[in-house]
Structures are given as C-alpha cells and as structure tokens.
Amino acid sequence: MADQLHTVRIETDVAVLMRDGTVLRADVYRPDAPGRFPVILERTPYNRWERRGNHVVIPHYVAQRGYAVVIQDVRGRFGSDGDFQPFHQERDDGFDTVAWCAEQRWSSGKVGTYGGSYVGATQWLAATQQPPALVCLVPLVTSDDYYEGWTYQGGAFQLGFVGSWSLNALTLANLPSLAGNDSGASDGGHGRLIAAIDRLPESLADAAPSALPHLDETQTPYYFEWLRHPTDDAYWRSVRIADSHHVITTPALNVAGWFDIFLGGSLRNFVGMQQHGATQEARQGQRLIVGPWSHTTLAAAASGAQYFGMAASPVGMDLLAEHLRWWDHWLKGVDNGVAEEPPVRIFVMGDNEWRSEQEWPLARTQYIDYFFRSDGHANTLDGDGALSTDAPTDGLGNEPSDSFVYDPANPVPTNGGGLCCYPALMPGGPSDQTATERRADVLCYTTPPLADDIEVTGPLSVTLYAATDAPDTDFTAKLVDVCEQNNCAMGLVDGILRGRYRQGTARAVPLPMGEAVEYTIDLWATSNVFKRGHCIRVEISSSNFPRFDRNPNTGEEPGQAMTMRTARQTVFHTAAYPSRITLPIIPRPELCVSGREKGMPIP
C-alpha cells in the first residue's frame, strides 16, 4: 500500500541561530499534519528560494511523502547574515543547523542531507563534526579535498572553473543590483571573464578595473585567498574531508559523473569512507553511483557531444527515487533492500548500460601498460605515434624522442572535459578532439584498430619521461576513444601536472632544465568499452586552457607572472625512459546484450 501523501506547509525566512549569534535563514517544507517527521537538510550558497526546484530533489514532492525539508542559505549568502568564507565556515554552521533541525517540534530527531557540488561540501564538512542527529548523507558531484581536484589539480590552478564559479555563481549571483548595468553582468559576466582570463596576472589585479570590476578583493576575497595558497598547505588541510574519514560516522550515497569536474574526489570519498569510516555502520553504509554525466548534465541521456541512451536518464536511473529509498531506509527504518544491494553501480560507456559491482576499483582488474612508441614524429593525429603493450627494449626500443614547442601565448584550448558554470561557452563532457589533435604541440599515441572490444574501467595514470628547457612547465595527458575510420575522437578524461610539484603539492621543487624527469599524471578514472574497430589514443601536451591556467614557463607562479616564454618539450620512450599509460582492463565475458539500448553519437 502506498504511503499517504500529505498536504504541505511552507514557512519562509525561518531564523536559525548559530553559536556565535549569527542568524542564518531557511525555508521549511513539511507535512501539514500532526506528528514528527524526519528532516532532510540542504545548505546552499546558491539562494534557497531558487533551490525549491532543485533538478534532482523537489522539496514539495519529498515533503508530501512524510519528510520535513529545510533549505538554508549558508552564512553570508542571500538571506543569511555574516561573511561568506567558503568551506571554513561550514563545519560549525552545519553542526549547529543539524542540531536545530533535530530540536524542532515537528522533527523526529533524525536528519539526512542532500545536494551537489558546494552543497556536497556542506554535508561532508558538517559530518566531520559528528552531529548526533545526522544519520545519512547524499552528496552529489562533490569532492574530498578543496585543494586537489577543486581549486588546483596537479599543482595547476583550475582557472576556468574557479574563475567562472567565483564571478558568476557567487559574486554576481549575490549582487542582483549589478545585472544590466555596464559592468558586464548583463551577459552573466561571461564576455568579460573570457577577456580577463586571457591576461596576466591571473590575480586580475591589473585587469579588474576594466575587465572584471567585481572580481576584486572587496567583492570576491576568497578568489584571491585561493591564489595566495598555491601549495597544499595548512589552509587547505584544515577543511580536507579525506583527512577526516576516520571520524565520520554517517553512511553516504555518493553520486558522481565520469565527466564531472569533481570525479576524483567523489571516488576518494567512497573508498576512504569504506576503509576508514569511524564505525562499522559508516564503512558498510557507503554506496556509489557513477553515470556518464558532467557537472551540469546529471541524470541526462546526453553529455557533451555524446548520447548515451535513455538508460542514462531518469528512465534508467531515477536519482530522486534513489534519494527517497536511501532516506526511507536510514530515517524511517523501511526494509526496502538498500542494505543488501551491491555497493557500487557504474554506467559502462560504449556498452551504455548500468552494472552493479561489489567494490571500487574492481577486484578483477588487470592493470596493463600501453607504451608510447614512435619514430620521433608523434605530433598531430597524422604522426607516427603508437600505443603498444610491447615495452621498448635496449635492442629494439631506443627510439628517437618526440618534441614540441609549448607557447603559453598560444595554449592548447580546452575542448570538453571537466568544466562547468558557463557550459554554453565551454561545455564539459565528451567532445571531439580532432581539431585539437591537428596542432603540432599535441603528441598523439594511438593503437591500431582493435580486433575485439576492450573494457577500461578503473583508475588511470600516465607515467611520462620528459625534459624541458624552461625553469618550470606543465605536462598534460588525455585519454581518447577514436571512432572507426578516425572520423571522431571522443575525449574521456584528462589530467595535468605542474613540473615544480612532481614530487607532491606540499612544496615546490625546482625543475632541472634539460634533464629527463619522471612525471605521474593522475587521470582519475573512467569506464568505457573501446569497441572493435576503434582505437585507444593518448594525447600529450603542456596546456589545456582555460580549464587549467597556463604555466608561463618562467618559474614564477602564474598568479603573479607578468611575462611568458616558450618551452621546448622532449618526451622519451626508451628502455630507460618507458613513457606509458596504465589502463585498468576488465576481462570481457561473453554476455547476452540483446535488448539493451545502445547509445549513438549525436549527429
């Protein structure tokens, strides 16, 4: 018998008092009926009134089903008092808000949370303080670390995301009076943002008055604070979720996307909590769902230039239903099978189907090295670069190196991948890399057409041996699925490593000019079946702009540099320096796939 649907009572501008006297304001959607109900909490910097139509969770719908839904503006945002200090304010404020929710006369005393991106951060940061009433989380497309994989990656500043997020989602969104004036806000700030990120320095100190008058120390102090912390220092460690897994007691339904900007952190939260959660219930109560989505295409059938079929949409994965099943189990005690289900569900691209697994990474993974090979001319997709499982040897493999010139004044442009916040200008997700691969500063290493399907599911990394004639530089890597007859090249995942941080991002280590240096470039993970007739390709270059900031090659921090220089890059693939990508290969049993929907590229 279906649960009774309640009429809903809505209370707005409800004051919630924090321990320091600051008042945060919330809207409450709850059943208009006597009794006490479990509370579902969302704490957002993006305007609680607009969140009433959250694209996954609809508060009115949830309240009809016997929950009290509380949506709160975080400190310093919209209706809430105080100063906005991203991440650092959310631990205590989250604890206090959970306690408030539990104490209300309409509350059962049990609280669950939900939300994505920064709203996922508000959940995890509150959980680090162990609020007694906090029972479960549903963090979507979020991270475990606000340095690595949020603000920086491999030591490179995530300029495209951080710049657009700071300006559009935070500063201009909280200053509605600016809209339509001559500040550039009438186009969402996009035009001026694009102009400004082409300039140096990245701090925009010189550019701000003319280009971005509202991205300055007064309106956006956190942007400049992040630039002042280019290493993984105490500022970032104080709010790192990964360092607190061992004290967190809450089960979590983690939802991620293969093309999401925070994929790496979502996976690390799942694995870290399974291994180090504070209680057996927390460790065994971790679940993971990963779909073929970007940050802005959650629960969509298409992402970027690729259509994955209705299995990727709510028809095949109803995330609202998954939220409700999760909350029903943990907050209402409903025996609905949640506890017995496999902990991992992944969407396997290429086959375009969902699959349940018992762990992540998969225990049956075979990690296989694909070595870079060439006769010294791997530049562009028309070069002689190859990927081979045969390693270079002293007798056969002392091949000539490949080289290219990286000019930060003409960087390799971002094309898809992990972008968000202004997707109309630079969409994230899988995109055709053919134009990028025609550049001479992009090395392409490609397998012959595959004789059989090859499934790659799991963590990925590139081991690169390279030299530069610059005091500092970057190296980038990208995994690409090359369609039959080389008529498309879909980017799957990319990564970067700044030379000075090759030994870790806690401190910079000078880069020896002209010497072969080992770089390990983390590509996070994917799940993709490279179909028969397709090719596996790895791109190597030194820029992916503006997804990542440009290294000026001068040895200066890009946020302070006023000049740039070119760098000649040399990539080695010999017995002594075996550059390679390590792929997580999943053995392919003969499976019946009749009746499964296959995705097709969008025409």
Image (tube, rainbow, N blue to C red):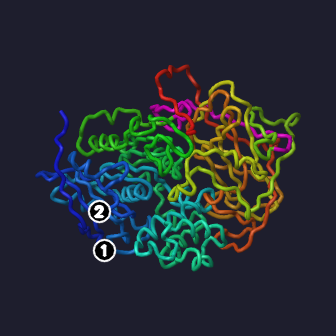
- The kind of secondary structure element at disc 1 is loop
Q: Earlier in the sequence, mark 2 or mark 1?
A: 1
User: In which quadrant is the N terminus drawn?
Assistant: top left
Above or below residue 335? Residue 261 is: below
User: In which quadrant is the C terminus drawn?
Assistant: top right
Residue 97 marker: 2
Label 2 and label 1: CA atoms lie apart by: 12 Å
Range of residues picked out in magenta: 348-377
- Residue 3: where, in percent of width, then height? 18, 39
Identity of the residue drawn at 52% across and 78% down: 217
Q: Residues within 10 Å of mark 2 (few under 14, many from 20)?
A: many
Can you identify the residue that label 1 sits on?
A: 22
Identity of the residue drawn at 75% across and 69% down: 564
Above or below residue 57? Residue 388 is: above
Front-most of 93 and 190?
190
Front-most of 534 and 565?
534
Identity of the residue drawn at 51% across and 52% down: 262
Residue 208 in magenta stretch: no
- Do the numbered discs 2 and 1 sit on residues whose CB atoms are within 8 Å? no
Could one spot residue 575 in this view of the protein?
no
- Residue 312: where, in percent of width, then height? 45, 38
Residue 530 marker: none
